[in-house]
Amino acid sequence: MTTNIVILQQKSGTSTDWESVDPVLLEGEIGYESDTKKIKIGDGVSTWTVLDYQVQDLATVATTGDYTDLINQPTIPTATSDLTNDSDYVVSSDLATVATSGDYADLSNAPNLATVATSGDYDDLNNQPTIPTATSDLTNDSDYVVSTDLATVATSGDYGDLANQPTIPTATSDLTNDSDYVVSTDLATVATSGEYTDLINTPTLATVATSGDYTDLTNQPTIPTTTSELTNDSGYIVTGDSIDATTLDFTNVPKSDPFVEGVLWSNGGILTISAG
């Protein structure tokens, strides 16, 4: 079986809307003022402003909002004893006296404490252990080295206390020359004297080697003292040579002076070198 739910929505509007339109509601038709929350029911004849509001029988609290206007008010607990302890909370009557006093004397079956429990004094302990005051009181199970195990040199630090001392060389002759170092007996006399006369197989030197004098040279070259002793292989012009002046470039040489640095211009275009 299908159940259909029908929702009815009544005509609604503010009180101002209803008054401005002032309609005539059908008989039994409901009109609802949304701002005042009041309703009117039509009679099919009267306009809205003529119809009376439907008055409901409201309890006093509906308009006062006061708790004291409620009927059948619930009893509100004011103490924990008004509540049923269904959570098994612990109450003072369930506690031992010591729970609130905190006094050791209120404990039942309190243990008998030794004196040290309250004094905290080592001297009040029974069966006190023997505390070693020297290393000799301890068993050397870690094999620590003690002074009696050491050689004399371990504490003296004296080389003379070493046993099987090595022979320390005091001269180079005490050492084996396995690196083939050169010794004085292997050297020629000149190595230590630095004297030329100690050299053997010395060369025979020419006189100039020690005099440094040019005149002591043999096969001296002929050194020219005049240009005529030289071969003119560069073609230098000498006195008495004539050349064609038209073949030379004297652009920058003034021709107004017949003598320019010893050069004489001839009327026939032949350049003649003058001696004076």
Image: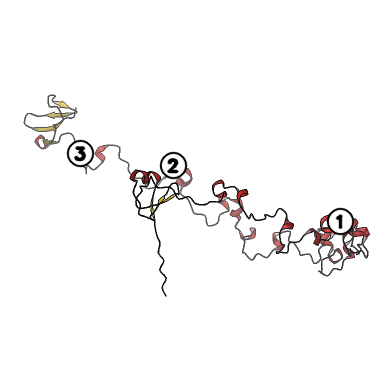
**Circle 1: residue type:** Asp
Q: Which residue is mark 2?
A: 213
| Between marks 3 and 2 in the image, the one whose residue lies nearer the viewer | 3
Secondary structure beneath label 2: loop
Residue 230, position as x, y percentages in the image? 25, 41
Q: Residues within 10 Å of mark 3 (few under 14, many from 20)?
A: few
Judged left or right of residue 157, residue 113 is right
Q: Which residue is mark 1?
A: 103
Residue 264, position as x, y percentages in the image? 14, 29
Q: Residues within 10 Å of mark 1 (few under 14, many from 20)?
A: few
User: Residue 222: which quarter of the image?
Assistant: top left
Determine the CA span between mark 3 and mark 1.
Answer: 143 Å
Determine the CA span between mark 2 and mark 1.
Answer: 131 Å
Identify the residue shown where x is 85% and y is 58%.
Answer: 97
Residue 126, position as x, y percentages in the image? 93, 64
Check the image and report above or below for 217 versus 188: above
> If you read the primary sequence from the N terminus, does the residue marked by circle 3 or circle 1 appear first?
1
92, 124: nearer the viewer: 92
User: Residue 100: which quarter of the image?
Assistant: bottom right
142, 18: nearer the viewer: 18
40, 10: nearer the viewer: 40
Q: Residues within 10 Å of mark 2 (few under 14, many from 20)?
A: few
4, 197: nearer the viewer: 4
Q: Which residue is mark 3?
A: 236
